[in-house]
Amino acid sequence: MENTSATANQTPTPDIKLLVVDIDGTIAGHNNSVREPVKQAIAQAKAKGIKVAIATGRMYSSALRFHDEIGSDLPVIAYQGAWIQEPLAQRNYHHLVVSRSISEQLLDYFEQPQFRDILSVHFYINDQLYVRELTQDTKAYAQRSGINPIAVGDLRKTLDNEPTKILAMCEDTKIIDQLLQNLRHQYPPSQLYLTKSIPTFFEAAHPQVNKGAAVKYLAEEVVGLQSHNVMTIGDNFNDVEMIEYAGIGIAMGDAPTPVKALAQWVAPSVEEDGVVAAIAKFLLS
């Protein structure tokens, strides 16, 4: 389905030299892996000289498997863009953190009586995951992410180092929406970047963090391209900025309606290999 209402970034005519893809809901679906048709389509794009990179909300260590699966030779954009690192040389290009004072304020908020027993709170520090306790939500998240969470009781103990990202999980999506609404009133964008990567995840990061800024940095500062040379594909609210930045910004078929409205084209869903359709339409035709 094409979205003909969004026309931003269509001048000059895109000459795509860089493809940036999200992981969850974009190149990886329910089975948590990249299907062979997606790998083949990405390989075809690379054969035409198009570079490929990952931009994800995941931890850097959790994203590496997907970086390898698609054969990327560019830095990984992790933590919504708060962490950009090149795996081979282990060069960290970019790392932004949430201040200790705001981290403590968020923790105070999450530990209010109405939230304490229903939220699983995650602090990501130096690419390690610290939690108060191992809830069922955290165990499921850790298994999917391929990481080992560290239970510390009081998360304030971890704040000798400041978090790259703070996440609160809750199966009740209304609670997540309430958190997002309330905390956006308390913290303007100049103080904190707040987003949802899936309906049950509330995420907070440094105010300069978003995937659009990270893709811009990768394209312009690392690779030497401009926005009209970039195509991005994502499926949720944390992908909005990179969809808007790119010469061709694509939303997956099961993205929320407001995200689709900002995209220049809407691909089929992840389970229908929407990335394959997008690559065929824009990069291989």
Image: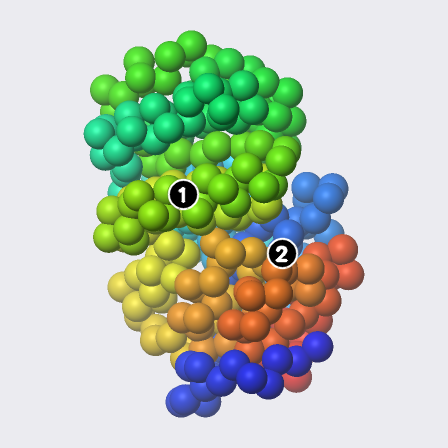
Q: Quick check: 228 above or below 201?
A: below
Indicate the position of residue 56 as horizontal and vertical percent values. Answer: 49, 49
Image height of 146 relative to 209, above or below: above
Quarter where residue 260 is shown: bottom right
Q: CA distance from mark 1 to mark 2?
A: 29 Å
256 lies left or right of 61 = right
| Label 2: which secondary element | loop
- Whole-percent x, y for residue 24 in the image: 61, 48
Q: In percent of the image, x 40 and y 43: which residue is there?
A: 182
The quarter of the picture where the C terminus appears is: bottom right
Q: Residue at x 40, y 34 (%)?
A: 166
Amino acid identity at mark 1? Asn
Which sits earlier in the primary sequence, circle 1 or circle 2?
A: 2
Q: Residues within 10 Å of mark 2 (few under 14, many from 20)?
A: many
Q: Which residue is located at x 55 percent, y 37 percent?
A: 175
- Name, please, the residue furthest toward the front: 114
Which residue is denoted by mark 1 in the rendering? 182
Q: Secondary structure at mark 1?
A: helix
Question: Measured from the top left, where is residue 277 in percent x and y?
Answer: 70, 71
Q: Amino acid at mark 2?
A: Thr
At x 23%, y 20%, the residue is 160
What is the crowding at mark 1: few (fewer than 14 residues within 10 Å), some, or many (at least 20)? Answer: few
Q: Which residue is mark 2?
A: 26
Please say whether residue 1 is visible from this viewpoint.
Answer: yes
Along the line of sight, the residue nearer the viewer: 93 or 90: 93
